[in-house]
Image (cartoon, helix red, strand yellow):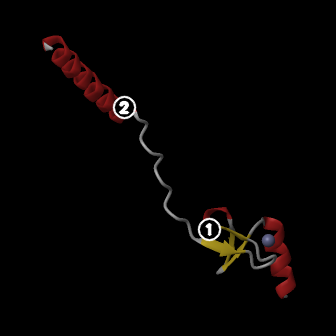
Amino acid sequence: MKYLLLFALLFLVLWIVRKNRERTSAPPPPAARPPERMVTCAYCGVNLPLSESVHSGNRHYCCVEHQHSGETRER
Ligand SMILES: [Zn+2]
């Protein structure tokens, strides 16, 4: 009976150690990127992140070709 209690205690200690190790060794969650503002291409209307867009005044374009096409279409 004494050994059974000792075995149970040992099992409990191992269980706690393993649980703690799982918690500490778990990789940290990837840092969530802050939501980026989406803009619409003034030429073709495609939505894209602000950092990937081409600025022209207060308009945004998805690529340089659309920037040129949009500017020439305005004139
Ligand atoms: Zn476009």
Front position in the image: 68 or 62: 62
Instruction: Give the vertical position of 25 relative to 46 (above or below).
Output: above
**Labelled disc at residue 22:** 2
What amino acid does circle 2 point to?
A: Glu
How crowded pointer 2 is (Cα within 10 Å; few <14, some 14-19, many 20+) is rated as few
- Mark 2: C-beta under 8 Å from nearest atom of ligand 1: no
Q: Looking at the picture, does residue 14 appear above or below residue 64?
A: above
Q: Which residue is mark 1?
A: 50
Tell whether 50 sits left or right of 24: right
The answer to which image quadrant residue 3 occupies is top left
* Mark 1, secondary structure of its residue: helix
- Closer-to-camera residue (27/37): 27
Secondary structure type for disc 2 = helix
**Residue 74 occupies which quadrant of the picture?**
bottom right
Looking at the picture, does residue 22 appear above or below residue 55? above
Asked if residue 24 is positioned above or below residue 63 in the image, the reply reads: above
Quadrant of the image for the C terminus? bottom right
Ligand 1 quadrant in view: bottom right
Tell me if 56 is positioned left or right of 27 in this view: right
* Residue 31 percent across, percent down from the top left: 46, 49
* Label 1 CA crowd tier, 10 Å (few <14, some 14–19, many 20+): some
